Amino acid sequence: MTKWQYEDIVDLPHHVSKKHPAMSPEKRAAQFAPFAALTGYDAAIAETARRTDEMISLSDTALEELNRKLMDALSADLEVTITYYVPDKRKTGGSYAEASGRIRKVEMGTVVMENGAKIQADRIVSLD
């Protein structure tokens, strides 16, 4: 197709309807917005891409040192920062979190902080 095929209409003025009002730029742009044909697909891709960490395995020596620090902090009523592993609820792996404060008690393999937070002792990787 060449320009010459439309030369009879090229110079005509743009038609403006007297019956229908002009569409606002926002509504016009909305017609070209992305369409999600597969509901939840973007969320599934994001979940797959989300990274998780594996739990660090401590040596027996490191576990003994950690236990000693835990008992010292408990008996001396010291403020500590505990780094511990939190398993992911949706996929294999997890992440590491920190809790700071005083330790209220240790019972049945659980460290109970003064603020009420409970941390499984076997998931603790460091105590400062």
Image (spheres, helix red, strand yellow):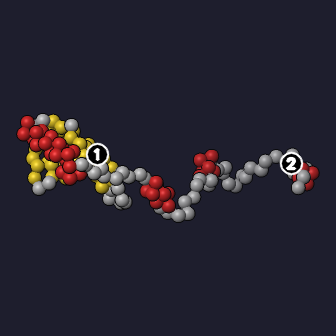
Question: Residue 110 at what x, y percent from top left?
Answer: 15, 52
Element carrying mark 2: loop
Q: Residue furthest right?
A: 4
Task: Determine if residue 113 is in view.
Answer: no
Vertical position of residue 55 compared to residue 75: above or below: below
Task: Give the crowd class for mark 2: few <14, some 14-19, many >=20 residues within 10 Å.
Answer: few
Vertical position of residue 46 compared to residue 115: above or below: below
Question: Residue 101 at what x, y percent from top left?
Answer: 17, 39
Task: Determine if residue 65 is in view.
Answer: yes
**Is 28 displayed left or right of 84 in the figure?**
right
Q: Residue at x 62, y 49 (%)?
A: 29
Numbered circle sitting on residue 97:
1
Q: Earlier in the sequence, mark 2 or mark 1?
A: 2
Q: Residue at x 68, y 54 (%)?
A: 20
Q: Quadrant of the N terminus?
A: bottom right
Element carrying mark 1: strand
Numbered circle sitting on residue 10:
2
Task: Give the crowd class for mark 1: few <14, some 14-19, many >=20 residues within 10 Å.
Answer: few
Question: Residue 123 at what x, y percent from top left?
Answer: 23, 51
Q: Tell which tag, 2 or 1, sits nearer the viewer.
A: 1
How many angstroms separate mark 2 from mark 1 (CA)? 67 Å
